[in-house]
Image: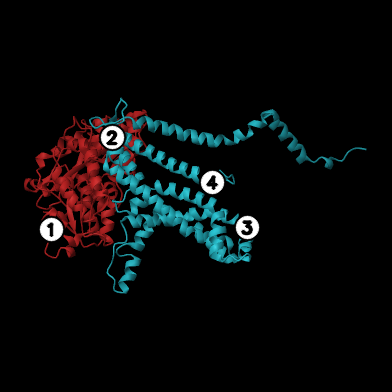
Amino acid sequence: MRPSRTSYPLSWRLMDAVEAVAAAVWPRSFSAAVPWLMLMPAVVLVGLLVLGLWDMADGSFRTLDTATFLPSDDYSLANYDRAFTEKLFFTVASRSLIGSLIVTVITLVFAFPYSYVMVRTRSAALRKFLLIALFLPFFIGQVVRAYGWLIILGSQGMVNEALGLVGVAPIRLLYNYPAVLFGLVQYMLPFAVLMLAPALTAIPEEMESAAGSLGANWVRTFIHVVLPLAKPGFIGAGLVVMTLSLTDFAIPAILGGGSQDFIANAIYDQFFRTSDQGMGATLALLLVAVGSIMVGVVFALFGAGTLAMGRSK
Amino acid sequence: MTGPSKPFLNLGRRRFLQGVGLAGAAGLVGMPFGRAFAAEPEKPKEIIVRAWGGSWVDSLKKGVSDPFTEATGIAVRHDLTEDNEIQPKVWAAVAQKRVPPIHINWDTTTNATKSALRGVTEDLSDLSNLANVTELAKPVGLDGYPIVNTYGYVYVLAYRPSAFPDGAPKSWKDLLDPKLKGRIALYNDGIGFHFPAQVAGGGKLEDIPDNMQAAWDFIAKIKEQEPLLGEDPDFTAWFQKGEIDAACTISTNAREAKANGVDIAWTVPEEGAKYDTDGLWIPKGLPENELYWAKQYINFAITKDAQQVWLDGLGLPGVVPGVNPPADLVGDPSYPTTEADFKKLIRISSKVQVEHESEWFGKFKEIMQG
């Protein structure tokens, strides 16, 4: 009896052909290399970054000749000497470091209850509202958001107008350090919530119920159950917020009124205002080094948190 | 374009022909432009001119770019990349022997001098209209014409009259009045303020650049006033939004704020005000024909007719004799025309400024960021 053609349909034949071609191009014996092949995009990306850093490292050892505006042929540590001895760079670096730590702490404090309610609420409407409120800022760029604060907090802005209604004279809410920190916290909050939410989702609700049934009130449950189990989320969120704050450019530039520069602003000045690319490269490399050390210390002390994708360390 | 601007364009077209040396024979005037330039190098479809935005580019377009396009058929595209940011791109292109991203850079003379010292600028000495310009067009301290200065400007003390009920401030020291705390603004690199600060601080201009302690002392006092630090667009915005009452800024920004309805005036205080120039230059590496037409653009920009319209928009004095000041700036200290006017202003060579810019920038920032 002749077999029916439908017993081996055309789509299967096509798949056989595709498999045969795939086997010819990538034999089964190569299968061990598949994970490495999938890593290739990341390797290329990091490789390009390293190449750029190498070029910057070369530039950082060359000083600017202001008679020709060319970098020197000779290598020296002059730029690094300036970076470590000039008061300007110390001021800007310490402001950036302290600022990033303050912003990280405040952002995590605000992000936790938001994430907790978003994850635990039984109201689908409230969860959707919180999600929309979380993602909406991502559609608005950082610069636009900063300008929004100029409108709201300016001398003739909405806040001062409201204060004027109750007889309070206009006060300067912008162009100072607190304004920069405020702007950074507002910018970083969605990032922190996004990093915290998966960690909170991973905490079984039954754990909290069990703590309650054993007599713990909500404060003890929160301190002894939720917070410890949420630690990976805090670490991941903290790392992201800290590194983004440390390297931020736009918020200090727009809300700082020119006198609250962070390191990124100082780097921009060297590259684009004084045309001293060697000094700019030096500051950029030091920023990378400081950021990496801070992340390394956190990894060593607390692990990588949610960034470790479930691994303990 | 129609209406009142037409007569100017006709005149500009004739002037343009004269400028590029093609109207030597009277019979050429009125000849179709395609034929008039038949012997010239091939025209590019467009040339790219880096410019500042807002009223700056509007004025350039009206006074130079549009008439140039009408006369030659070459479109002019304005690239509004910041002058500081285009510089490394141009430098990299020249170093790598690539075609630069722009044909002409409208630049501060100080910035342009850096590019000239680096050797990335074309020599413009052969522009025919340089025969008709004042000495202001020539960059100080450089050989030839790697840059053509096109106008001068003054860093005035702009102020809100309502904040100065006793009349215009007479001295930069008036900015130290406690009632102005948090209500004044400077450029974020201190440009325009160093030299008057040297005088206001009790120093001498002759001591620049060797001893500027008086300037730093005065700037340190200004720092106590918690000034805002920004760039050109910031000043206009800050005056409009009521953030500041006084600023050291280019008169054009103050004039623009006034045109936008802000109650603002400006003055040159008794210590003087910095006078500087902007210019046009061409980066090396352009194809020959594009270089030729880029030069013609600059040659046209220093004709009287182009300057009259361009600089009317900016409210700045040009480099061609006979350009009339806008009606609102006749006798204004920000529009110097006489020797007496210039005596009130402070001009330091671009070369000195360039050589010490990084040092002055660092010192100013150190004070202001402290």
Name the colour assigned to chain B in the rendering. Answer: red
**Mark 4 → mark 3, Cα distance in angstroms:** 20 Å
The label number, if any, that marks residue B282 in the structure image:
2
Which is more foreground, mark 1 or mark 4?
4
Q: Secondary structure at mark 4?
A: helix
Which is more foreground, mark 4 or mark 2?
4
Tell me if label 1 and label 4 are in contact, CB under 8 Å. no
**Mark 4 → mark 2, Cα distance in angstroms:** 50 Å
Name the amino acid type tagged 1.
Pro
**Mark 1 → mark 3, Cα distance in angstroms:** 70 Å
Q: Residue at x 47, y 50 (%)?
A: A238
Check the image and report above or below for A240 versus B297: below
Tell me if label 4 and label 2 are in contact, CB under 8 Å. no
**Mark 2 → mark 1, Cα distance in angstroms:** 41 Å
Name the amino acid type tagged 3.
Pro
Name the amino acid type tagged 4.
Leu
